[in-house]
C-alpha cells in the first residue's frame, strides 16, 4: 500500500481507551491494518523499502525424507512444556502448556499439561481392564478391544487443573509468564464411549448417587463424582486429537468429565464403583479443597468457572514499536459456551468487545481477538469473559471480598488458592516490554 | 378404537422403547465382586472397605522410620516432602477430616517408590503413629477396622460442600 497520509475517516473506529479498535476491523472491508497508524504517532512503522529478495538455498535443493511420525520444525524446539520435576524426584510432577507460543484453540498432544503424582505408568493395552461395580445390577469388565466396538462420540473440550492460575492469589503479582500462571489448562478433541452407555449394561441401583473413579497407576488416584455427571456428559476417552491418548494423559483410557476440575478426569482409568456417598479420598479432602480465611474450607467445588487471559501479547513478548497489534487470548467456562469477551487496554477503565473465533463450543477453549493500535505509551491489557449461564470473571476486589485478600507472596509453582478465575492484567511499558501487574 | 386395542398399542410402544434402550453392544464380561476384590481398595469414612488387621503407634514408628521418614522428616514434621503432623499448612493435625483417608491414601499410594507394598498391619500402624503424633489418639490405642472410623478428627466439621452447584 502507499505511505500516503490517511485521513482520520479512513482509520478503523477506536472503541475504547488506549487504542482498542472495533473488532469488525478484523473482518476486512479493505482495511490494511499494518499501515493503520494514527497520524504522526506511528510514522516510523510504515514500511520502509524491503531488501531485494535473494533465492534461498532451500529453493535450490531437494527436501528431507518424510518421517513416519512428524514432529515440529527444528526451529520450534523452544515450544515445549515447562517441567517442575525433570529429575523425577519423589514428589508430584507438573508440565505446563506454553500458551504464549501457540495459537488457535486445540493443544497439540505433546504440549497438553500434566499433573501427576509419580509420572505415567507403562500399561499394556491388551491387559488393561475397566471394571464397573458397586451399586449396579451386574458388575462388568471391559477390555479396550471391547470398548473400541462401542458407539463413540467426539467432543472438543478443555481440561483444567483446579489449581491453575493459583499464583494470581499472591500478595504481589508474581513475575512469570502465561505458561507459568495459566499453563495448567489445555484443550483437545476427545473421542470415546459415553459412560452412560456402559451403565445401561451394568444397570444402576437407585441408591447410587455418586461414583468412584480410580486409575491403574501406582498411586491409584481416586475421586468421588456425582452420578448426575455420569448420566450427563461423562465419557471414557480413548482418543485425543485423533490418536490414542498419550501416556501422561491416561493411556489407554481416561475419564472425561467436561468442565469439571482436571483431577476428576481420572487417567489410566480402571475402576468405576457406584456408591452412596463420597469416599473422602485424599484428593477431595486435602488437595482440591480450598482453605478460605474465616470460613469453612470449600469441598467438592467441581466446575472450572468462566475464565480468560490474554496470550498475545503476554510476558516474554515485546512490542516492536507503536502501531497495530492483535490482542488475542483464550476464554472458557466449565458451565457452557463463552458468550462474550471484553478487552481493556487501560487497566479496566474502558472496555471493548472482542471478536470470538468460531466455533464457540461448550466447555472448550475459545479464541478471542481484538485489534489494537498501540501508541507507544504504557498500557494495561485485560480480558473479561462471560458464559452463556451469565457468569463472569471476578475482579481482584471481588475475589478478596469472597475469599479474603492474599496476604503472602508465593512461588509461582505454589497452589495458594484453587479455582482462581480472577481477571489477569499485563502491563506494557513504553519500551514494549510486557509484565504481570495487578490493576 | 376400543380401549383394549389402545392398551395393546401402549404396551407395544413400551416394549419397543425398552428394547431400543437395551440395544447396546453388551461386550462387557460379567464378574463377581469376589473376583474383583483385589482391586476394590476404596475405604469410606464409615470404615466400609477397611481390611482385617491392626497396628499401634509404637509399631507404626518402626515402619515410619524405615519407609516414610526419608521424605516426610523426623516425626512427620516435614523434609523433602510435606509435613504430615504440624499446625502449619494442611496436615493430619489440623486439616484431614477423616482418619480413614490416611489409611486409604497410605495403602494405595505410599511409600512413593513402592505403592501398595505395605501390609494391612503396617498401614494401620503407620496411621496410628501419625494420629498419636498429632495427639488425636493415645500412645497405646490400637487402630483396626473397628476403631479407625470412630476416630474423631479435629477438623471433621471444617468443610462446606460446593456441590450441587448454584448454576
Image (tube, rainbow, N blue to C red):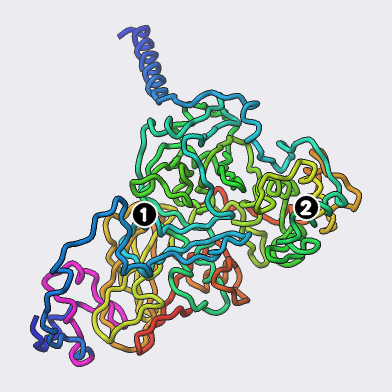
Res A133 quadrant in image: top right
Q: On what subunit does the disc labeled 1 rest?
A: A
Res B38 quadrant in image: top right
Label 2 CA crowd tier, 10 Å (few <14, some 14–19, many 20+): many
Quadrant occupied by the N terminus of chain B: top left
- The image shows residue B162 at horizontal and vertical percentages of 58, 53
Q: Secondary structure at mark 2?
A: loop
Residue B59 appears in view: yes
Residue at (32, 52) in percent of width and height: A69
Q: Which residue is mark 2?
A: B153
User: Residue A433 shows which numbered tag?
Assistant: none
- The image shows residue B93 at horizontal and vertical percentages of 77, 59
Q: Nearer the viewer, residue B124 or B160?
A: B124
> Distance from label 1 to label 2 (Cα)?
41 Å
Residue A282 sits above or below residue A399 on the image: above
Q: Nearer the viewer, residue A114 or B62?
A: B62
Q: On what subunit does the disc labeled 2 rest?
A: B
Q: Secondary structure at mark 1?
A: loop
Residue at (44, 68) in percent of width and height: A179
Q: Is residue A415 left or right of residue A149?
A: right
Q: Is residue A25 on the magenta stretch?
A: yes
Label 1 CA crowd tier, 10 Å (few <14, some 14–19, many 20+): many
- The image shows residue A78 at horizontal and vertical percentages of 38, 70
Farthest residue, direction right: B140
Res B9 quadrant in image: top left
Q: Is residue B53 left or right of residue A388?
A: right
Q: Nearer the viewer, residue A200 or A340?
A: A200
Q: Which residue is mark 1?
A: A337
Which region shows up in magenta? A13-41
Residue at (37, 22) in percent of width and height: B20
Amino acid at each position: 500500500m502507499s505511505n500516503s497520509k490517511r485521513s482520520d475517516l479512513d482509520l478503523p473506529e477506536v472503541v475504547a481507551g488506549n487504542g482498542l479498535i472495533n473488532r469488525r476491523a478484523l473482518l476486512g472491508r479493505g482495511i490494511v491494518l499494518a499501515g493503520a497508524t494514527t497520524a504522526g504517532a506511528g510514522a516510523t512503522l510504515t514500511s520502509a523499502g524491503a531488501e531485494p529478495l535473494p533465492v534461498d538455498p532451500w529453493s535450490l535443493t531437494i527436501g528431507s525424507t518424510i518421517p513416519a511420525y512428524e514432529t515440529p520444525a527444528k526451529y520450534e524446539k523452544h515450544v515445549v512444556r515447562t517441567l517442575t520435576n525433570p529429575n523425577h524426584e519423589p514428589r508430584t510432577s507438573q508440565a505446563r502448556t506454553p500458551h504464549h507460543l501457540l495459537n488457535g484453540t486445540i493443544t497439540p498432544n505433546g504440549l497438553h499439561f500434566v499433573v501427576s503424582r509419580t509420572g505415567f505408568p507403562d500399561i499394556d493395552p491388551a491387559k488393561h481392564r475397566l471394571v464397573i461395580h458397586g451399586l449396579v445390577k451386574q458388575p462388568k469388565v471391559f477390555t479396550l478391544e471391547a470398548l473400541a466396538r462401542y458407539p463413540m462420540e467426539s467432543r472438543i473440550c478443555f481440561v483444567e487443573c483446579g489449581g491453575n492460575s493459583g499464583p494470581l492469589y499472591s500478595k504481589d503479582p508474581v513475575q512469570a509468564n502465561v505458561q507459568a500462571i495459566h499453563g495448567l489448562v489445555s484443550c483437545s478433541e476427545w473421542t470415546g464411549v459415553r459412560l452412560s452407555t456402559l451403565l445401561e449394561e451394568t444397570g444402576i441401583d437407585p441408591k447410587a448417587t455418586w461414583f468412584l473413579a480410580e486409575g491403574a497407576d501406582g498411586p491409584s488416584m481416586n475421586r468421588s463424582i456425582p452420578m448426575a455427571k455420569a448420566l450427563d456428559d461423562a465419557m471414557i476417552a480413548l482418543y485425543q486429537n485423533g490418536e490414542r491418548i498419550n501416556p501422561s494423559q491416561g493411556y489407554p483410557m481416561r475419564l472425561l468429565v467436561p468442565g469439571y476440575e482436571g483431577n476428576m478426569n481420572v487417567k489410566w482409568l480402571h475402576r468405576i464403583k457406584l456408591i452412596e456417598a463420597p469416599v473422602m479420598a485424599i484428593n477431595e479432602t486435602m488437595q482440591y479443597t480450598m482453605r478460605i480465611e474465616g470460613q469453612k474450607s470449600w469441598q467438592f467445588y467441581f466446575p472450572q468457572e468462566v475464565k480468560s487471559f490474554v496470550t498475545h501479547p503476554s510476558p516474554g513478548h515485546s512490542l516492536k514499536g507503536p502501531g497495530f497489534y492483535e490482542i488475542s487470548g483464550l476464554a472458557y467456562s466449565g458451565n457452557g459456551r463463552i458468550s462474550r469477551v471484553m478487552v481493556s487496554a487501560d487497566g479496566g477503565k474502558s472496555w471493548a468487545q472482542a471478536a470470538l473465533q468460531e466455533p464457540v463450543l461448550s466447555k472448550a477453549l475459545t479464541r478471542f481477538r481484538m485489534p489494537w493500535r498501540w501508541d507507544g505509551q504504557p498500557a494495561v491489557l485485560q480480558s473479561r469473559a462471560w458464559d452463556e449461564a451469565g457468569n463472569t470473571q471476578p475482579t481482584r476486589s471481588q475475589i478478596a471480598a469472597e475469599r479474603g485478600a492474599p496476604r503472602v507472596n508465593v512461588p509461582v509453582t505454589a497452589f495458594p488458592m484453587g479455582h482462581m478465575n480472577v481477571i489477569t492484567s499485563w502491563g506494557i511499558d513504553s519500551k514494549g516490554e510486557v509484565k504481570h501487574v495487578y490493576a | 378404537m376400543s380401549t383394549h386395542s389402545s392398551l395393546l398399542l401402549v404396551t407395544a410402544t413400551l416394549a419397543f422403547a425398552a428394547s431400543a434402550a437395551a440395544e447396546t453392544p453388551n461386550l462387557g464380561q460379567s464378574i463377581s465382586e469376589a473376583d474383583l476384590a483385589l482391586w476394590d481398595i476404596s475405604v469410606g469414612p464409615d470404615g466400609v472397605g477397611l481390611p482385617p488387621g491392626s497396628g499401634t503407634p509404637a509399631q507404626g514408628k518402626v515402619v515410619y522410620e524405615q519407609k516414610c521418614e526419608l521424605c516426610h522428616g523426623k516425626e512427620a514434621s516435614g523434609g523433602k516432602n510435606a509435613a504430615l503432623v504440624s499446625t502449619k499448612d494442611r496436615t493430619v493435625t489440623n486439616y484431614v477430616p477423616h482418619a480413614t483417608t490416611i489409611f486409604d491414601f497410605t495403602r494405595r499410594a505410599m511409600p512413593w517408590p513402592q505403592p501398595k507394598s505395605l501390609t494391612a498391619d503396617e498401614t494401620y500402624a503407620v496411621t496410628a503413629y501419625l494420629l498419636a503424633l498429632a495427639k488425636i489418639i493415645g500412645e497405646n490405642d490400637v487402630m483396626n477396622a473397628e476403631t479407625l472410623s470412630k476416630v474423631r478428627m479435629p477438623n471433621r466439621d471444617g468443610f462446606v460442600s460446593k456441590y450441587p452447584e448454584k448454576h
